[in-house]
Amino acid sequence: MFRLSVLCAALFLSVAAGAQTTEDAVCKLISDFSTARNTGDVPAMLRTYAEDAKFKSFDNPVLEGRKRIAFVWSKPPAGNTERKIVDIRFIRTDFSIVQVDSTFTGPMGSLHFMETFEVAMQAGTWQIKSHVSYHGAK
């Protein structure tokens, strides 16, 4: 019985460690995106998006595919966006929805908003599948 308890505890810790590692990888993806955006490293930022990703910024039309997204991000607005992950929900082990509380500060002032990222593991790498920015967050 003791042996089974130890085995179950070891299995639980292994699964928990794997979940934490997966959550850490998703957090790193969002952090990498944010850092690349804030430093103006457009190629690095675009690498965080899946080839078939979708991007919707506020009331603008949905852009589909990394090439169309690249057109919008080719000249990101001057300023920085501070992002704070407020929720990560794993729908599957390879797919997660991430809610981010964001504040953009630029030459014309600040804007507070929410972002939702759908991220998926593809070919061993976490990538952004969908990125939506919403007005009016508090």
Image: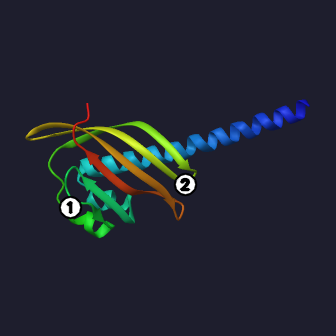
Q: Residue at x 31, y 66 (%)?
A: 64
Residue occupying the point 55% across, 46% down? 22
- The answer to which image quadrant residue 80 occupies is top left
Q: Position of residue 6 (x, y in %)?
A: 82, 33
Q: Secondary structure at mark 1?
A: helix
Where does the C terminus fall, quadrant-wise? Answer: top left
Q: Is residue 55 left or right of residue 12?
A: left
Comparing 49 with 55, the one in front is: 55
Give the image location of residue 33, x and y in percent. 34, 51
Residue 71 placement (x, y as % from top left): 21, 66
Image height check: is 132 above or below 67? above
* Secondary structure beneath label 2: loop
119, 137: nearer the viewer? 137
Q: Amino acid at mark 2?
A: Asp
Q: Which residue is mark 2?
A: 94
Residue at 76% x, 37% y is: 10
Q: Which residue is situated farthest in the left direction here? A: 108
Is 20 left or right of 51, judged from the image as shown? right
Q: Which residue is denoted by mark 1 in the rendering?
A: 72
Q: Is residue 124 left or right of residue 67?
A: right
Sequence-first tag of 2 and 1:
1
